[in-house]
Amino acid sequence: MSQQLDHGAGLYGTELSEPAQREAFTNGDVPVAVYGLGKMGLPLAAVYADVSGNTIGVDIDEEVVETVNRGECHVKREPGLADLVSETVADGSLRATTDATAAAADAAVHVLMVPTLLTDEQEPDLSILTAAVESIGAGLSPGDLVIVESTVPPRTTVDHVVPRLAEVSGLDPDEFGVAACPERTVSGEALQDIRGTHPKVVGGVDSESGRVAALLYGELSDNEIIETSDATIAEAVKVFEGVYRDVNIALANQLATYAEAMDADVTEAIDVANTQPFCEIHDPGPGVGGHCIPVYPYFLTGAFDVDDDLLPTARAVNDGMADYTVSMLEAILAAHGVDRDDPTVLLLGLTYKANIEELRNAPSLPIASHLRETGVKVLGVDPMIDSDDWGDLDDIERVDLADATAQQADAVVVVTPHEEFAALDWDAFDAPILDGRGSIDADATDAPIYRIGGVWPNVPADHGSNHE
Protein backbone atom coordinates (compact mmCIF):
# COMPACT_ATOMS: atom_id res chain seq x y z
CA MET A 1 0.00 0.00 0.00
CA SER A 2 1.37 3.44 -0.90
CA GLN A 3 2.02 5.99 1.78
CA GLN A 4 -0.79 8.54 2.03
CA LEU A 5 -1.24 11.94 3.60
CA ASP A 6 -4.49 13.27 5.00
CA HIS A 7 -5.81 16.24 3.02
CA GLY A 8 -4.61 19.45 4.64
CA ALA A 9 -1.75 17.85 6.55
CA GLY A 10 1.69 19.43 6.69
CA LEU A 11 5.01 18.05 5.52
CA TYR A 12 7.20 19.26 8.37
CA GLY A 13 8.22 16.32 10.54
CA THR A 14 6.23 13.76 8.54
CA GLU A 15 7.48 10.19 8.24
CA LEU A 16 6.49 9.98 4.58
CA SER A 17 9.25 9.38 2.07
CA GLU A 18 10.33 12.38 0.01
CA PRO A 19 8.77 10.97 -3.20
CA ALA A 20 5.47 10.62 -1.32
CA GLN A 21 5.77 14.16 -0.02
CA ARG A 22 6.35 15.50 -3.52
CA GLU A 23 3.36 13.58 -4.79
CA ALA A 24 1.18 14.92 -1.98
CA PHE A 25 2.26 18.48 -2.76
CA THR A 26 1.68 18.23 -6.51
CA ASN A 27 -1.63 16.36 -6.02
CA GLY A 28 -3.12 19.19 -3.98
CA ASP A 29 -3.08 17.33 -0.66
CA VAL A 30 -0.92 20.07 0.88
CA PRO A 31 -2.92 23.34 0.73
CA VAL A 32 -0.83 26.48 0.14
CA ALA A 33 -1.62 30.06 1.16
CA VAL A 34 0.32 32.97 -0.33
CA TYR A 35 0.01 36.21 1.63
CA GLY A 36 0.33 39.29 -0.58
CA LEU A 37 -0.88 39.41 -4.19
CA GLY A 38 1.14 42.31 -5.50
CA LYS A 39 3.58 42.46 -8.41
CA MET A 40 5.62 39.56 -7.03
CA GLY A 41 3.00 37.84 -4.89
CA LEU A 42 0.46 37.15 -7.63
CA PRO A 43 3.01 35.50 -9.96
CA LEU A 44 4.24 33.37 -7.04
CA ALA A 45 0.69 32.36 -6.07
CA ALA A 46 -0.10 31.49 -9.69
CA VAL A 47 2.97 29.26 -9.98
CA TYR A 48 2.21 27.58 -6.66
CA ALA A 49 -1.35 26.99 -7.92
CA ASP A 50 -0.11 25.61 -11.22
CA VAL A 51 2.19 23.14 -9.47
CA SER A 52 0.14 22.22 -6.39
CA GLY A 53 -3.40 22.57 -7.69
CA ASN A 54 -4.49 23.91 -4.32
CA THR A 55 -3.48 27.49 -3.53
CA ILE A 56 -5.29 30.41 -1.97
CA GLY A 57 -3.99 33.96 -2.31
CA VAL A 58 -4.52 36.45 0.49
CA ASP A 59 -4.60 40.23 0.15
CA ILE A 60 -6.08 43.08 2.16
CA ASP A 61 -7.26 44.83 -1.01
CA GLU A 62 -10.81 43.67 -1.79
CA GLU A 63 -10.56 44.87 -5.38
CA VAL A 64 -7.43 42.75 -5.93
CA VAL A 65 -9.16 39.69 -4.47
CA GLU A 66 -12.28 40.21 -6.58
CA THR A 67 -10.16 40.67 -9.70
CA VAL A 68 -8.26 37.44 -9.10
CA ASN A 69 -11.43 35.47 -8.35
CA ARG A 70 -12.81 36.61 -11.71
CA GLY A 71 -9.76 35.04 -13.29
CA GLU A 72 -8.32 38.42 -14.18
CA CYS A 73 -4.88 39.92 -13.55
CA HIS A 74 -4.28 43.36 -12.04
CA VAL A 75 -0.50 43.26 -12.60
CA LYS A 76 0.46 44.92 -15.86
CA ARG A 77 3.06 43.79 -18.37
CA GLU A 78 3.98 40.53 -16.73
CA PRO A 79 4.28 38.14 -19.70
CA GLY A 80 2.18 35.00 -19.29
CA LEU A 81 0.71 35.97 -15.94
CA ALA A 82 -2.79 36.90 -17.12
CA ASP A 83 -3.15 33.56 -18.90
CA LEU A 84 -1.82 31.60 -15.92
CA VAL A 85 -4.17 33.35 -13.48
CA SER A 86 -7.11 32.74 -15.80
CA GLU A 87 -6.25 29.06 -16.20
CA THR A 88 -5.60 28.31 -12.52
CA VAL A 89 -8.72 30.12 -11.34
CA ALA A 90 -10.82 28.37 -13.98
CA ASP A 91 -9.67 24.89 -12.90
CA GLY A 92 -10.00 25.69 -9.19
CA SER A 93 -6.28 25.63 -8.43
CA LEU A 94 -6.20 29.30 -7.41
CA ARG A 95 -8.65 31.39 -5.43
CA ALA A 96 -8.29 34.53 -3.35
CA THR A 97 -9.58 35.94 -0.08
CA THR A 98 -9.16 38.86 2.28
CA ASP A 99 -9.59 36.55 5.29
CA ALA A 100 -6.00 35.73 6.22
CA THR A 101 -6.86 33.83 9.39
CA ALA A 102 -9.30 31.53 7.60
CA ALA A 103 -6.78 30.92 4.83
CA ALA A 104 -4.16 30.08 7.45
CA ALA A 105 -6.48 27.58 9.13
CA ASP A 106 -6.93 25.75 5.83
CA ALA A 107 -3.32 25.82 4.65
CA ALA A 108 -0.35 23.65 5.49
CA VAL A 109 2.22 25.76 3.66
CA HIS A 110 2.18 29.51 4.30
CA VAL A 111 4.18 31.79 1.98
CA LEU A 112 4.79 35.40 3.01
CA MET A 113 5.19 37.83 0.12
CA VAL A 114 4.37 41.14 1.77
CA PRO A 115 6.49 44.31 1.58
CA THR A 116 8.92 45.58 4.18
CA LEU A 117 8.82 49.37 4.14
CA LEU A 118 10.91 51.99 5.90
CA THR A 119 9.97 54.36 8.70
CA ASP A 120 10.58 58.09 8.46
CA GLU A 121 13.83 57.39 10.30
CA GLN A 122 14.93 54.98 7.53
CA GLU A 123 14.55 51.94 9.73
CA PRO A 124 12.88 48.70 8.57
CA ASP A 125 9.15 48.67 9.26
CA LEU A 126 8.01 45.09 9.89
CA SER A 127 4.41 45.98 10.74
CA ILE A 128 2.90 44.49 7.55
CA LEU A 129 4.93 41.32 7.96
CA THR A 130 3.97 41.10 11.63
CA ALA A 131 0.25 41.39 10.84
CA ALA A 132 0.52 38.55 8.32
CA VAL A 133 2.56 36.42 10.74
CA GLU A 134 -0.05 36.90 13.45
CA SER A 135 -2.81 35.81 11.04
CA ILE A 136 -0.81 32.71 10.16
CA GLY A 137 -0.17 32.01 13.81
CA ALA A 138 -3.90 32.07 14.53
CA GLY A 139 -4.40 29.20 12.10
CA LEU A 140 -1.09 27.38 12.43
CA SER A 141 -1.13 23.60 12.91
CA PRO A 142 1.60 21.10 13.83
CA GLY A 143 3.47 20.04 10.70
CA ASP A 144 2.88 23.34 8.87
CA LEU A 145 5.70 25.16 7.10
CA VAL A 146 5.96 28.97 7.00
CA ILE A 147 8.09 30.40 4.17
CA VAL A 148 9.37 33.98 4.23
CA GLU A 149 9.74 35.03 0.58
CA SER A 150 9.61 38.70 1.58
CA THR A 151 12.93 40.52 1.61
CA VAL A 152 13.68 41.31 5.25
CA PRO A 153 16.64 42.32 7.41
CA PRO A 154 18.84 39.34 8.27
CA ARG A 155 17.74 37.59 11.48
CA THR A 156 14.09 38.61 11.00
CA THR A 157 12.96 35.01 10.51
CA VAL A 158 14.68 33.57 13.57
CA ASP A 159 14.34 36.57 15.89
CA HIS A 160 10.89 37.83 14.92
CA VAL A 161 8.85 35.39 12.84
CA VAL A 162 9.42 32.19 14.82
CA PRO A 163 8.79 33.65 18.30
CA ARG A 164 5.64 35.46 17.13
CA LEU A 165 4.26 32.35 15.46
CA ALA A 166 4.86 30.33 18.60
CA GLU A 167 3.29 32.98 20.83
CA VAL A 168 0.13 33.39 18.74
CA SER A 169 -0.36 29.70 17.90
CA GLY A 170 0.54 28.29 21.32
CA LEU A 171 2.71 25.70 19.58
CA ASP A 172 6.29 24.87 20.46
CA PRO A 173 8.75 26.04 17.76
CA ASP A 174 9.73 22.43 17.06
CA GLU A 175 6.14 21.60 16.03
CA PHE A 176 6.20 23.69 12.86
CA GLY A 177 8.77 24.65 10.26
CA VAL A 178 9.99 28.07 9.16
CA ALA A 179 12.32 28.90 6.29
CA ALA A 180 13.60 32.02 4.57
CA CYS A 181 13.34 31.62 0.80
CA PRO A 182 13.77 35.16 -0.54
CA GLU A 183 12.31 36.00 -3.93
CA ARG A 184 14.85 36.67 -6.68
CA THR A 185 12.45 38.02 -9.27
CA VAL A 186 12.33 41.06 -11.52
CA SER A 187 9.17 42.77 -12.69
CA GLY A 188 8.46 41.78 -16.27
CA GLU A 189 10.24 38.45 -15.82
CA ALA A 190 8.56 37.13 -12.69
CA LEU A 191 7.18 33.84 -13.97
CA GLN A 192 10.40 32.73 -15.61
CA ASP A 193 12.40 33.85 -12.58
CA ILE A 194 10.21 31.84 -10.19
CA ARG A 195 10.48 28.83 -12.46
CA GLY A 196 14.23 28.88 -12.63
CA THR A 197 16.07 31.82 -14.19
CA HIS A 198 18.31 31.82 -11.12
CA PRO A 199 19.08 29.20 -8.47
CA LYS A 200 16.53 29.27 -5.66
CA VAL A 201 17.93 30.07 -2.21
CA VAL A 202 16.36 28.42 0.85
CA GLY A 203 17.43 28.45 4.47
CA GLY A 204 15.57 26.86 7.35
CA VAL A 205 15.61 27.73 11.01
CA ASP A 206 16.40 24.03 11.45
CA SER A 207 17.46 21.25 9.10
CA GLU A 208 13.92 19.87 8.68
CA SER A 209 12.56 23.28 7.69
CA GLY A 210 15.30 23.66 5.11
CA ARG A 211 14.70 20.17 3.77
CA VAL A 212 10.96 20.67 3.26
CA ALA A 213 11.43 24.11 1.72
CA ALA A 214 14.02 22.71 -0.71
CA LEU A 215 11.65 19.88 -1.59
CA LEU A 216 8.79 22.26 -2.41
CA TYR A 217 10.88 24.65 -4.48
CA GLY A 218 12.40 21.71 -6.27
CA GLU A 219 8.93 21.22 -7.74
CA LEU A 220 8.45 24.90 -8.59
CA SER A 221 11.88 25.56 -10.09
CA ASP A 222 13.86 23.88 -12.84
CA ASN A 223 17.08 25.42 -11.55
CA GLU A 224 19.38 24.48 -8.69
CA ILE A 225 18.07 24.76 -5.14
CA ILE A 226 20.77 26.17 -2.87
CA GLU A 227 20.16 25.31 0.76
CA THR A 228 22.11 27.70 2.97
CA SER A 229 23.32 26.99 6.50
CA ASP A 230 20.37 28.76 8.08
CA ALA A 231 17.61 31.28 7.51
CA THR A 232 19.80 34.28 8.32
CA ILE A 233 22.23 33.45 5.51
CA ALA A 234 19.34 33.12 3.05
CA GLU A 235 17.98 36.51 4.12
CA ALA A 236 21.42 38.09 3.80
CA VAL A 237 21.85 36.73 0.27
CA LYS A 238 18.92 38.77 -1.03
CA VAL A 239 19.86 41.92 0.86
CA PHE A 240 23.48 41.66 -0.30
CA GLU A 241 22.36 41.31 -3.92
CA GLY A 242 20.45 44.58 -3.70
CA VAL A 243 23.20 46.39 -1.81
CA TYR A 244 25.76 45.31 -4.41
CA ARG A 245 23.71 46.93 -7.14
CA ASP A 246 23.15 50.12 -5.15
CA VAL A 247 26.87 50.54 -4.48
CA ASN A 248 27.82 49.68 -8.06
CA ILE A 249 25.29 52.15 -9.47
CA ALA A 250 26.63 54.76 -7.04
CA LEU A 251 30.11 54.20 -8.43
CA ALA A 252 28.83 54.69 -11.98
CA ASN A 253 26.91 57.80 -10.95
CA GLN A 254 29.90 59.24 -9.10
CA LEU A 255 32.09 58.68 -12.14
CA ALA A 256 29.45 60.39 -14.28
CA THR A 257 29.82 63.55 -12.22
CA TYR A 258 33.43 63.86 -13.49
CA ALA A 259 32.24 64.36 -17.06
CA GLU A 260 31.90 68.14 -16.81
CA ALA A 261 35.32 68.70 -15.24
CA MET A 262 37.02 66.24 -17.60
CA ASP A 263 35.12 67.58 -20.62
CA ALA A 264 34.82 63.98 -21.73
CA ASP A 265 32.22 61.25 -22.23
CA VAL A 266 32.53 59.16 -19.07
CA THR A 267 29.96 56.65 -20.36
CA GLU A 268 32.31 55.73 -23.19
CA ALA A 269 35.11 55.19 -20.70
CA ILE A 270 32.83 52.96 -18.62
CA ASP A 271 31.82 50.90 -21.66
CA VAL A 272 35.42 50.33 -22.68
CA ALA A 273 36.55 49.63 -19.11
CA ASN A 274 33.92 46.89 -18.93
CA THR A 275 35.61 45.00 -21.76
CA GLN A 276 38.10 43.91 -19.12
CA PRO A 277 36.60 40.85 -17.37
CA PHE A 278 37.28 42.11 -13.85
CA CYS A 279 35.39 45.37 -14.38
CA GLU A 280 31.57 45.47 -14.30
CA ILE A 281 30.56 49.08 -13.76
CA HIS A 282 26.83 49.73 -14.14
CA ASP A 283 25.33 52.52 -16.25
CA PRO A 284 24.87 55.96 -14.69
CA GLY A 285 21.42 57.52 -14.65
CA PRO A 286 19.11 60.04 -13.00
CA GLY A 287 18.69 58.01 -9.83
CA VAL A 288 17.68 54.68 -8.32
CA GLY A 289 14.02 53.97 -7.62
CA GLY A 290 11.59 51.24 -6.70
CA HIS A 291 10.88 49.27 -3.55
CA CYS A 292 14.11 47.23 -3.64
CA ILE A 293 17.53 48.69 -4.39
CA PRO A 294 17.12 52.06 -2.59
CA VAL A 295 15.53 50.31 0.39
CA TYR A 296 17.66 47.23 1.08
CA PRO A 297 20.76 49.09 2.33
CA TYR A 298 18.66 50.27 5.27
CA PHE A 299 17.95 46.64 6.14
CA LEU A 300 21.57 46.64 7.29
CA THR A 301 22.33 50.20 8.36
CA GLY A 302 18.94 50.63 10.01
CA ALA A 303 18.88 47.27 11.74
CA PHE A 304 22.43 46.71 13.03
CA ASP A 305 24.81 48.87 15.02
CA VAL A 306 27.81 48.65 12.71
CA ASP A 307 30.29 51.36 11.72
CA ASP A 308 29.44 51.57 8.02
CA ASP A 309 30.26 54.59 5.87
CA LEU A 310 30.04 52.90 2.47
CA LEU A 311 26.34 52.09 2.21
CA PRO A 312 25.08 55.51 3.41
CA THR A 313 27.53 57.21 1.04
CA ALA A 314 26.29 55.16 -1.89
CA ARG A 315 22.71 56.03 -0.99
CA ALA A 316 23.59 59.72 -0.83
CA VAL A 317 25.26 59.58 -4.25
CA ASN A 318 22.30 57.90 -5.87
CA ASP A 319 19.76 60.16 -4.18
CA GLY A 320 21.80 63.14 -5.37
CA MET A 321 21.49 62.22 -9.04
CA ALA A 322 18.13 63.94 -9.34
CA ASP A 323 19.79 67.21 -8.37
CA TYR A 324 22.68 66.47 -10.73
CA THR A 325 20.21 65.83 -13.56
CA VAL A 326 18.56 69.19 -12.93
CA SER A 327 21.96 70.92 -12.93
CA MET A 328 22.85 69.34 -16.26
CA LEU A 329 19.45 70.28 -17.65
CA GLU A 330 19.95 73.89 -16.62
CA ALA A 331 23.29 73.89 -18.42
CA ILE A 332 21.58 72.52 -21.52
CA LEU A 333 18.91 75.23 -21.39
CA ALA A 334 21.55 77.91 -20.94
CA ALA A 335 23.68 76.56 -23.79
CA HIS A 336 20.68 76.69 -26.11
CA GLY A 337 19.75 80.23 -25.20
CA VAL A 338 16.74 79.49 -23.03
CA ASP A 339 16.90 82.31 -20.49
CA ARG A 340 13.29 83.35 -20.14
CA ASP A 341 11.64 83.26 -16.73
CA ASP A 342 9.28 80.35 -17.34
CA PRO A 343 10.90 77.55 -19.37
CA THR A 344 8.98 74.32 -20.02
CA VAL A 345 10.51 70.87 -19.63
CA LEU A 346 8.91 67.63 -20.83
CA LEU A 347 9.68 64.49 -18.81
CA LEU A 348 9.26 61.17 -20.62
CA GLY A 349 8.68 58.25 -18.27
CA LEU A 350 7.85 58.86 -14.62
CA THR A 351 7.80 55.38 -13.08
CA TYR A 352 11.03 54.11 -11.57
CA LYS A 353 11.66 51.48 -14.25
CA ALA A 354 10.75 50.94 -17.88
CA ASN A 355 7.41 49.21 -18.47
CA ILE A 356 6.67 48.95 -14.73
CA GLU A 357 3.72 50.61 -13.01
CA GLU A 358 5.50 51.75 -9.86
CA LEU A 359 6.26 55.29 -8.67
CA ARG A 360 7.83 54.41 -5.34
CA ASN A 361 11.14 56.28 -4.99
CA ALA A 362 11.02 57.16 -8.71
CA PRO A 363 13.75 59.70 -9.68
CA SER A 364 11.22 61.63 -11.75
CA LEU A 365 9.54 62.92 -8.60
CA PRO A 366 12.49 64.81 -7.07
CA ILE A 367 13.55 65.95 -10.56
CA ALA A 368 10.12 67.48 -11.12
CA SER A 369 10.09 68.97 -7.63
CA HIS A 370 13.51 70.58 -8.08
CA LEU A 371 12.52 71.98 -11.46
CA ARG A 372 9.30 73.45 -10.09
CA GLU A 373 11.25 75.11 -7.28
CA THR A 374 13.23 77.04 -9.91
CA GLY A 375 10.13 78.17 -11.78
CA VAL A 376 10.16 75.56 -14.55
CA LYS A 377 6.86 74.31 -15.94
CA VAL A 378 7.01 70.52 -15.91
CA LEU A 379 5.06 68.34 -18.33
CA GLY A 380 5.01 64.57 -18.07
CA VAL A 381 4.23 61.61 -20.31
CA ASP A 382 3.85 58.11 -18.92
CA PRO A 383 1.71 55.42 -20.59
CA MET A 384 1.99 53.21 -17.49
CA ILE A 385 0.08 55.66 -15.27
CA ASP A 386 -3.68 55.94 -15.68
CA SER A 387 -5.14 59.43 -15.66
CA ASP A 388 -7.03 58.56 -12.46
CA ASP A 389 -3.71 57.86 -10.70
CA TRP A 390 -2.14 61.18 -11.69
CA GLY A 391 -3.48 62.99 -8.64
CA ASP A 392 -0.33 62.44 -6.56
CA LEU A 393 1.90 64.06 -9.19
CA ASP A 394 1.30 67.65 -8.14
CA ASP A 395 4.46 69.00 -9.78
CA ILE A 396 3.78 67.47 -13.20
CA GLU A 397 1.14 68.39 -15.81
CA ARG A 398 -0.10 65.29 -17.63
CA VAL A 399 0.38 64.96 -21.39
CA ASP A 400 -0.94 62.08 -23.50
CA LEU A 401 1.62 60.03 -25.40
CA ALA A 402 -0.01 60.95 -28.70
CA ASP A 403 0.55 64.64 -27.95
CA ALA A 404 4.13 64.34 -26.69
CA THR A 405 5.91 65.65 -29.79
CA ALA A 406 3.45 68.54 -30.17
CA GLN A 407 4.45 70.16 -26.88
CA GLN A 408 6.33 73.45 -27.04
CA ALA A 409 8.99 72.32 -24.59
CA ASP A 410 12.37 73.99 -24.19
CA ALA A 411 13.97 70.65 -23.31
CA VAL A 412 13.01 66.99 -23.19
CA VAL A 413 14.27 64.59 -20.51
CA VAL A 414 14.02 60.81 -20.91
CA VAL A 415 13.82 59.64 -17.31
CA THR A 416 12.40 56.16 -17.90
CA PRO A 417 12.40 54.67 -21.43
CA HIS A 418 9.07 52.81 -21.70
CA GLU A 419 8.75 50.66 -24.81
CA GLU A 420 6.14 53.04 -26.29
CA PHE A 421 8.78 55.74 -26.62
CA ALA A 422 10.66 53.70 -29.23
CA ALA A 423 7.96 54.66 -31.75
CA LEU A 424 8.19 58.40 -31.08
CA ASP A 425 9.28 60.67 -33.88
CA TRP A 426 12.27 62.05 -32.04
CA ASP A 427 13.03 64.42 -34.90
CA ALA A 428 9.70 66.15 -34.22
CA PHE A 429 11.01 67.53 -30.93
CA ASP A 430 12.25 71.05 -31.55
CA ALA A 431 14.33 71.05 -28.39
CA PRO A 432 17.51 69.53 -26.93
CA ILE A 433 17.09 66.12 -25.33
CA LEU A 434 18.69 64.85 -22.13
CA ASP A 435 18.67 61.06 -22.46
CA GLY A 436 18.88 59.91 -18.86
CA ARG A 437 19.12 56.22 -19.75
CA GLY A 438 21.10 56.20 -22.99
CA SER A 439 18.07 54.87 -24.84
CA ILE A 440 17.92 57.07 -27.96
CA ASP A 441 19.71 56.28 -31.19
CA ALA A 442 21.76 59.33 -32.12
CA ASP A 443 20.61 58.95 -35.73
CA ALA A 444 16.94 59.20 -34.72
CA THR A 445 16.97 63.00 -34.61
CA ASP A 446 18.92 66.07 -35.56
CA ALA A 447 18.16 67.56 -32.16
CA PRO A 448 21.08 67.77 -29.74
CA ILE A 449 21.17 64.70 -27.47
CA TYR A 450 22.96 64.76 -24.13
CA ARG A 451 23.49 61.90 -21.75
CA ILE A 452 24.19 61.69 -18.04
CA GLY A 453 27.89 60.95 -17.90
CA GLY A 454 28.34 62.38 -21.37
CA VAL A 455 29.97 65.64 -22.48
CA TRP A 456 28.30 68.70 -21.00
CA PRO A 457 27.06 71.55 -23.21
CA ASN A 458 29.21 74.61 -23.68
CA VAL A 459 27.52 77.15 -21.42
CA PRO A 460 28.25 80.86 -22.06
CA ALA A 461 30.46 82.25 -19.30
CA ASP A 462 28.03 85.08 -18.54
CA HIS A 463 25.02 82.78 -18.15
CA GLY A 464 24.36 82.00 -14.49
CA SER A 465 22.37 79.11 -13.08
CA ASN A 466 19.31 79.44 -10.91
CA HIS A 467 19.86 76.05 -9.34
CA GLU A 468 21.30 75.87 -5.87
Image (cartoon, helix red, strand yellow):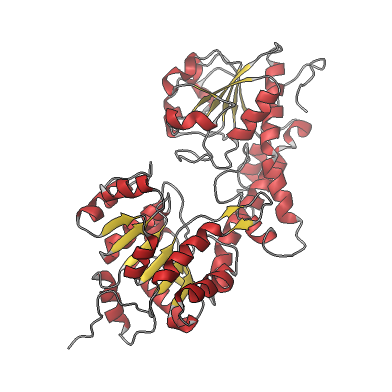
Q: Is residue 191 left or right of residue 347?
A: left
* Residue 367 visible in image: yes
Residue 402 x %, y %: 41, 20
Picture coordinates of residue 364 (x, y %)? Answer: 59, 33
Q: Is residue 169 above or below residue 102?
A: below
Q: Is residue 257 above or below residue 213?
A: above
Residue 91 vs residue 285: left or right?
A: left
Q: How many marks?
A: 0
Nearer to the camera, 440 or 419:
419
Q: Position of residue 90 (x, y in %)?
A: 20, 53
Instruction: Please indicate whether residue 39 sits to the left or right of residue 328 in the image.
Output: left
| Residue 240 found in image quarter | bottom right
Front residue of 92 and 309: 92
Pinpoint residue 317: horizontal percent, then vertical percent. Answer: 71, 44
| Residue pictured at 74% horizontal, 55% vertical | 310
Would you place residue 133 above or below residue 333 in this image?
below
Question: For the view shown, which residue lies furthest in the right direction?
Answer: 462
Quarter of the picture containing the C terminus is top right
**Residue at the spot x=36%, y=55% of the render?**
98
Position of the N terminus, as image quadrant, is: bottom left
Residue at the extreme left of the image, as rendered: 1
The residue lying at 23 percent from left, 85 percent from top is 3
Q: Is residue 222 visible?
A: no
